[in-house]
Image (spheres, grey):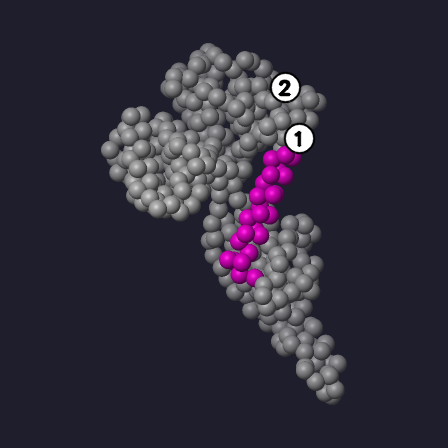
Amino acid sequence: MDTTPFRPLLGHHGPFASVYFDIALNVPDGQERMDATWQDIRRDLLHQGADNTIIATLEPAVRQQLSLAGPRGLITSADAVHIAAAAGYPRSGLPLTRVSQLPYVLPLMNGDLWHPNYLLVAVDREGAELTVHQNHRRVRRETLQGDGYPVHKAATAGWNGYGDFQHNVEEAVRINVRAVAARVTELADEIGAAVIFVSGQVRTRAEMTAELPKRLAASVVALPSGTSGQRLSDHDAHEFIEEVLRTRHTTEMHQLTETFAQERGNQSGRAVDGLRSVCAALRDGNVDTLLIGDLGAAAVLLGTGPTTVATDADTLSDLGQAPSAVARADEALPFAAIAGRSAIAYATRDLTLTDGVGALLRHRAMEYAPGDGHAVEARR
């Protein structure tokens, strides 16, 4: 997934508290469970060394998230809660808590933050309602009223001049559809929309799509029509959109896995795996997509910057740096990827990665020497 939603974390310093939980709310003792879950979280955080400032910052946010269905995750430091969102883990399991110098973001990768930017266009003969979804939330909605008029044909076919009137109606609709397509193009380019969802009458949808540049027309997905046969509300479209986005996400993960396997098999220099090689690529800013498998409790050394990660002190010494800390690999590598503007994805189960990590590279590189990646042992 695109790591843009996580980049604000780069401007804050640890320690961070990373908290994940999922509780059932539709039970008689729902409120009691919420209170008990918070107490469990609080106790775990204090046991791991969280100070009272972090606890005080986190408590209202955790209680608010506990009232929402499904797995939730929060990342906070002493000064603020930085992320509160749906997570992909845990599902009806015990809360997962960490207090560390780096945030633990991986459980959020299968939550709602992986949503790409997209547009929802409810189009009709007069114009459209356009909704921009960016950075996993709806950011704005606008209504576009076309200049074309009239847009409805005369009810009496025998009326003199009906042919001219019909032509005027069709031309008015074309004017409006072109205006909608022009605005959709502007917005899609502005946010880098991965998908353009379009609802409305079949003919109007098709005419609007035909007016889009080919590069955008290929990303159009038609939504079912609303009860009136025309516009579909955001609420009615939500489940359909979620399913399309999730299917798209799953397909992309499989494609990434296949690409990685092919590049590695061909020894093209565009794919590496193993802690040592991946750390080297992250230090060079050469990771396009970080692939995460089973990292277990592996750890790496940190240097002075977020991308300075290594499996041994000698590597950092060659860079003129001394180790500043030991960090879990499942925290340090994603954080380095965020700093390097790399994407992050979970590898599919059928892909075996040395040390549980791999990377697709931006540029061909043959100098990343493979290693066992186990020079550092985790302390937790």
Residue that mark 1 sits on: 258
Instruction: Please state the horizontal and vertical placement of residue 160, each as a whole percent of the image.
Output: 74, 88
Of the residues shown, which amino acid type is indicated by label 2? Met
Residue 111 versus residue 71: which sits nearer the camera? 71
Identity of the residue drawn at 48% across and 46% down: 136
Crowd rating for badge 2 (residues with CA inside 10 Å; few <14, some 14–19, many 20+): few
Q: Is residue 198 magenta?
A: no
Residue 98 in the image: above or below residue 250: above
- As drawn, the label of residue 366 is 2
Q: Considering only order in the chain, which callout, 1 or 2, is on the residue closer to the N terminus?
A: 1
Identity of the residue drawn at 45% across and 14% down: 376
Crowd rating for badge 1 (residues with CA inside 10 Å; few <14, some 14–19, many 20+): some
Instruction: Please state the horizontal and vertical placement of residue 86, each as a whole percent of the image.
Output: 45, 42
Identity of the residue drawn at 54% across and 45% down: 116
Residue 175 in the image: above or below residue 262: below
Magenta extent: 232-255
In this view, the residue farthest toward the left is 52
Residue 62 in the image: above or below residue 313: below
Relative to 218, 186 lies left or right: left
- As drawn, the label of residue 107 is none
